[in-house]
Image (spheres, rainbow, N blue to C red):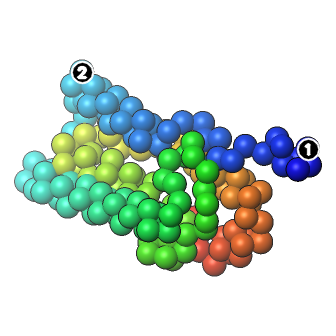
Amino acid sequence: MNEANDSFRDNSGAMVRPPLAWILAVAVGFLSDGVFPLPFLPPAMPAFWLGAIVFLAGLALLIWAATTFRGAGTHIQTVEPTTTIVEEGPYRYSRNPIYIGMFLGLIGLAIGFDSLWLFILLVPFYFVIRHGVVAREEAYLERKFGDVYRTYRTRVRRWL
């Protein structure tokens, strides 16, 4: 093995575990809402049910994406090595359906609980995921899979 391969860390080196970032955003949103509520929806809107639908759509996408990863025999956790580029299921449409599911979950909670705080926290959550996780994952996948990943990246958008 050459020196370059010896120093190759076989995981994305993500800055944070995405589920922990999501839980932190949700917790801060609910705590902020408890201290200083910021409702944003009209009172007549069926916010709870609309929020539940959006949340469940995000959860369904996340489960579909995770199941597709498992079916391909690769790891979901950012601290584990990726064994293959997954191009099936939701990965035909987006390179990051798990994170889109997390975004939808946060949006669903914001709507369901009529909390502008949860919407506001979507912004820092996005930047943490985009720059602290996705950017590192993309660099890792390009180093590890080279042209296979570059070809996939040109065919499938990062988000939608």
Residue furthest front as drawn: 1
Residue 94 relative to residue 66: left or right: right
Residue carrying label 1: 3
Give the image quarter of residue 104. bottom left
Image depth: mark 2 or mark 1 in front? 1
SS at mark 2 in the image: helix
Q: Name the foreground residue: 68 vs 27.
A: 68
Q: Crowding at label 2, few (<14), some or many (≥20) Cα neighbours within 10 Å?
A: few
SS at mark 1 in the image: helix
Give the CA separation, mark 2 to mark 1.
54 Å
Q: Amino acid at mark 2?
A: Val
The residue sitting at 44% across, 57% down in the picture is 98
Q: Is residue 68 above or below residue 39?
A: below
Q: Name the foreground residue: 132 vs 119.
A: 132
Q: Is residue 108 above or below residue 96?
A: above
Residue 4 relative to residue 44: left or right: right
The residue sitting at 21% across, 25% down in the picture is 34
Residue 3: give x, y in percent of width and height. 91, 44
Q: Amino acid at mark 1?
A: Glu
Give the image quarter of residue 14. top right
Q: How many marks?
A: 2
Residue 55's tag is none
Labels 2 & 1 near each other (Cβ < 8 A) = no
Q: Name the foreground residue: 22 vs 64.
A: 64
- Can residue 46 be seen here? The reply is yes
Residue 35's tag is 2
Residue 108 relative to residue 100: left or right: left
Q: Crowding at label 1, few (<14), some or many (≥20) Cα neighbours within 10 Å?
A: few
Of label 2 and label 1, which has the lower sequence position?
1
The residue sitting at 65% across, 74% down in the picture is 152
